[in-house]
Image (tube, helix red, strand yellow):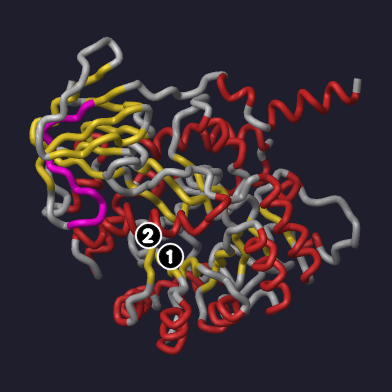
Amino acid sequence: MEKKFLVVAILILSGIGNVIGQAIPQKTILINNVQIFNGKDEKLLTGNVLIVGGLISKVSSTPIPTNKSANTIIIDGKGKFLMPGLIDAHAHTMMDAIPLQLAMVSDIGYVNLFAANSAGKQLMRGFTTVRDMGGASFSLKTAIDQGLVNGPRIYPSGATISQTGGHGDFGMPTDVPRQVGAPLSYFEKTGMTSIADGADQVLMRTREQLRQGASQIKLMAGGGVSSNYDPIDVAQYTEAEFKSAVAAAENWGTYVAVHAYTPKAITAAITAGVKCIEHGQLMDEPTAKLMAAKGTWLCLQPFLDDEDATPFPEGSDNRAKQLQMFSGTDNAYKLAIKYKLKMAFGTDCLFDAKIARRQGIQLTKLTRWFTPYEILKMATSTNAELLAMSGFRNPYKNKLGVIEEGAYADLLVVDGNPLQDIKLVEDPENNFLVIMKNGVVYKNNLK
């Protein structure tokens, strides 16, 4: 009986059951008469795109012949703007819209349902792919891939890995001293975060996330704003701890990214082999030079003291840390541009449905430092380059973020030209006429 149960479990886990509710792309879709931004080049191509089985089969400036049958859908683009689906390289799909207090006290089943609802809204904002930088998103990813719910492609990190008192430690003040071998907290047991101290524990927790299907690993390398125990200036994890995570990830053909704001935290992580820095607002010139020399990626967010700032109480420690972090945003972008760092765009929306709805507005804030073309390229083909760094652990084997033969048919038809008016992406409900992912049309206002 035990053997039988094991066989059934293996079959299910290996994806044999994926046919249930699977989102099957239409066999053939032809989009005619569109202005094509391929995700890489500023010059547009006036032409047509053929999609077969979820992939782009042909891009041409001349008419594309196709068999007219019941399995062929022809969309007249009416001269509109066609672009790759947007990519958010720093998302938290399990936590972007649910209030923190609710997430902390709710059953993980409820959190998953909440997250599934949010994921559908994210797709309808035109974000067809996200890199999830912390949270128990494996089940949500599987459900989306199988078509059980709608949402973007997810590159999951699994639980964030944090030291005791680090940015991922959301325990109560009375939870210390921790007893060695004591049961994990509910937040840890459900895979939202993982507390690990010492190289051996970091190694084990990293391997656990890889075992579950992580495409990259996320560690906390420095103090955070929303966490209560760690000042921003505190660097977290020793070189040995970082190296244990890096070694495990590299052995699995992928990489480690870290939460870090300060030069001290960034430098320690890079020295140990970390490939991507998330945030980096307080970096200085020597840090930027080091990142340029090492080819380290920077996933920086346009965090400013504006209407999208998380509303921490005035005078609180969290508010003080927030203002400190905000003060470095402008300089961080200037240094990144000066030293030509590899830059990705991400929103880091957390615990606030209002801010999550403004995902496209976070993108347009980049006009403070970049041209519309540079912004769209960053949010499509450049972000896709970062996703591809997951190597053997890449869950999606074809190209993303581009319109070219062999790439996934993740596409948006826009009513207007965002290369001329980037603010069009702020209102996806009215301006995104067609939203397609993997050759499946989720919205079509061109009918």
Q: Give left or right: position of 214 versus 27.
A: right
**In which quadrant of the rendered image does the N terminus lie?**
top right
Packing grade of label 2 (10 A; few <14, some 14-19, many >=20) is many
Query: Is any part of residue 370 visible from this angle?
Result: yes
Query: Is any part of residue 222 visible from this angle?
Result: no
Task: Look at 65% across and 68% down and name the residue there.
Answer: 246
Residue 223 is situated, as x and y percent measured from the top left of the image, at 59, 72
Task: Look at 20% across and 14% down and name the residue there.
Answer: 68
Helix, strand, or loop for circle 1? Answer: strand
Whether 7 is among the magenta residues is no
* Mark 2: amino acid: Phe
Where, by quadrant of the figure, is residue 42 drawn? bottom left
Q: Nearer the viewer, residue 207 or 267?
A: 207
Give the Cα separation between the discs numbered 2 and 1.
6 Å
Whether 32 is among the magenta residues is yes
Residue 138 is situated, as x and y percent measured from the top left of the image, at 61, 41
Task: Note whether 371 is above or below 158 in the view shown.
Answer: below
Task: Look at 23% across and 67% down and name the residue there.
Answer: 370
Tell which circle, 2 or 1, labels the residue nearer the N-terminal end: 1
Magenta residues? 30-41
Packing grade of label 1 (10 A; few <14, some 14-19, many >=20) is many
Task: Look at 67% across and 32% down and name the residue there.
Answer: 14
Q: Give left or right: position of 31 versus 220.
A: left
Helix, strand, or loop for circle 2? Answer: strand
Residue 252 is situated, as x and y percent measured from the top left of the image, at 65, 57
Disc 1 marks which residue? Answer: 299
Residue 224 is situated, as x and y percent measured from the top left of the image, at 56, 68
Where, by quadrant of the figure, is residue 335 drawn? bottom left
* Mark 1: amino acid: Cys
Disc 2 marks which residue? Answer: 345
Task: Note whether 415 is above or below 361 in the view shown.
Answer: above
Would you say the residues marked 2 and 1 are in contact, meaning their CB atoms lie under 8 Å apart?
A: yes
